[in-house]
Image (cartoon, rainbow, N blue to C red):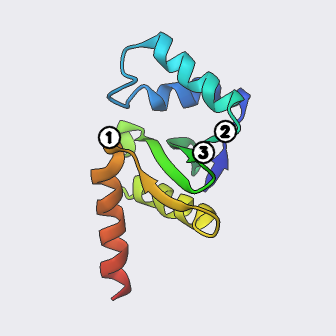
């Protein structure tokens, strides 16, 4: 289930975002990213929770037109279980009525793969 990020989940969110290549091993950058999600009304961070929080997906709204997925991360011990795809699908469902949902360059390959799988399943 996708839940909206709250301050009390900060450490979990930071841990998940730390698996992103551009955030990895840079605590200062990670803190800036979390702060941006907390303060910028155009940045939205969600966490994927089953029994535990297993993943994070973040997006930013650009020009009131696009919802750009800019972070996606799954706990390494829970990868290859479809959690990333579930997060992408849920974000698409939440935002597709109002925005064109797309992904930034770092996420694009994974995002396209999720979209291809959906298209094949619907044929």
| Residue at horizontal 47 percent and vertical 12 percent from the top | 27
N-terminal-most mark, 1 or 2: 2
Query: Which residue: 38% across, 85% down?
Result: 122
Q: Image height check: is 107 above or below 20?
A: below
On the picture, is 110 further left or further right than 84? left
The C terminus appears in which quarter of the rendering?
Answer: bottom left
Q: Where 115 sits versus 25, above or below?
A: below
Between tags 1 and 2, which lies in front?
1
Residue 104 drawn at (x, y percent): 39, 45
Circle number at residue 5 = 2
| Residue underneath mark 3 | 46
Q: What residue does disc 1 label?
A: 106
Mark 1 Cα within 10 Å, few/some/many (few <14, many 20+)?
some
- The CA span between labels 1 and 3 is 18 Å
Name above or below for residue 101 compared with residue 19: below
| Camera sees residue 80 | no
Calculate the distance from the C-alpha at mark 3 to the C-alpha at mark 2. Answer: 5 Å
Density class for disc 3 (Cα within 10 Å; few <14, some 14-19, many ≥20) is: many
Position of residue 17 measured from the top left corner of the image (x, y, whole percent): 46, 30
Q: CA distance from mark 1 to mark 2?
A: 22 Å
Residue 90, placed above or below residue 12: below
Who is closer to the viewer here, 51 or 117? Answer: 117
Disc 3, SS: strand
Neighbourhood count class around disc 2 (C-alpha, 10 Å): few under 14, some 14–19, many 20 upward: many
What residue is drawn where x is 35% and y is 63%?
114
Quarter of the image where one finds residue 116:
bottom left
In what quadrant of the picture does the N terminus appear? Answer: bottom right
Decide which of tag 3 and tag 2 comes sooner along the chain.
2
Which sits earlier in the primary sequence, circle 1 or circle 3? 3
Discs 1, 2 touching: Cβ within 8 Å: no
Residue farthest top in this picture: 28
Q: Check whether the beta carbons of the residues at disc 3 and disc 2 lie within 8 A of each other.
A: yes
């Amino acid at each position: 289930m996708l839940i909206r990020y709250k301050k009390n989940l900060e450490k979990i969110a930071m841990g998940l975002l730390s698996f992103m290549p551009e955030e990895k091993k840079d605590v200062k950058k990670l803190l800036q990213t979390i702060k941006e999600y907390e303060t910028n009304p155009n940045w939205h961070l969600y966490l994927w929770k089953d029994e535990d929080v297993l993943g994070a997906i973040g997006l930013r709204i650009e020009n009131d037109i696009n919802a750009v997925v800019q972070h996606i991360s799954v706990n390494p011990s829970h990868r290859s279980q479809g959690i990333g795809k579930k997060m992408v699908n849920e974000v698409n469902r939440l935002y597709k009525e109002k925005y064109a949902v797309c992904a930034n360059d770092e996420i694009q390959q994974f995002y396209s793969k999720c979209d291809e799988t959906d298209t094949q399943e619907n044929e």
